[in-house]
Amino acid sequence: MSCCASGKTIRGAANSMAVKRYVLDSYAVLAYLEDSAGADFIEELLHKAIDRQCELFMCVVNYGEVIYIHERKRGLTKAQETIARLAELPVQVIDADSICTLKAAHIKANYPISFADCYAAALAAVKDAVVVTGDPEFACLEEAGIIQVEWLGR
């Protein structure tokens, strides 16, 4: 199996190679959930994924970030509501296998970016996908040509 290949599908996205692929990092998902800058673009991507015009992925590590941030800010009950809400989205949550972890570790060793963000970048590299984020930490990876970024709020 390739890096990050095993995953749990949350309401089917297309498997066709012809459609554009995106990796949502925690920033993008939080923007959508909190209706902040970039939420409209994420909503547009969600509709496209439902219509099988694109594929959406998220690494389980970044999924965990969204949950812990909501639990810290709003409590356990709201975090559980967030889990239920995310389960309805047409996003494939991909497990972090050992190959993906090594790829993320390599990125972390060479670039000033959080380890969780390294997982989003590693998944994007494996899936040949564009990272959707507003997090400026990804700029160094984009400048180095490691990933492509669709910037929110710019």
Image (cartoon, rainbow, N blue to C red):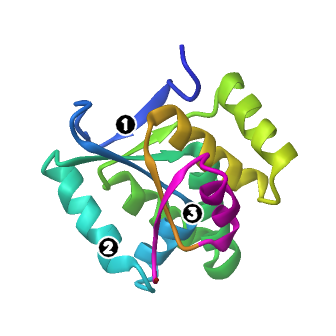
The secondary element bearing badge 2 is classed as: helix
Q: Residue furthest right?
A: 109
Residue at image mark 3? 26
User: Where 92 falls versus 77 (above or below)?
Assistant: above
Name the kind of residue labelled 2 in the image.
Phe
Residue 84 is inside the magenta segment: no
Q: Residue furthest top?
A: 1
Q: Residues within 10 Å of mark 1 (few under 14, many from 20)?
A: some
The N terminus is located in which quarter?
top right
**Residue 65 occupies quadrant:** bottom right
User: Where 37 falls versus 27 (above or below)?
Assistant: below
| Residue at x 31% of width, y 55% of height | 88
The mark closer to the camera, 3 or 1, is 3
Kindly check if marks 3 and 2 are in contact, taking CB atoms under 8 A apart as contact.
no
Rendering coords of residue 7 (x, y %): 47, 30
Q: Residues within 10 Å of mark 2 (few under 14, many from 20)?
A: some
The secondary element bearing badge 1 is classed as: strand
| Residue at x 58% of width, y 44% of height | 60
The mark closer to the camera, 3 or 2, is 2
Rendering coords of residue 102 (x, y %): 76, 29
Residue 148 is inside the magenta segment: yes
Name the kind of residue labelled 1 in the image.
Thr
Magenta stretch in the rendered image: 135-153
For residue 41, which numbered disc appears in the image?
Answer: 2
Query: Mark 1 or mark 2, which has the lower sequence index?
Result: 1
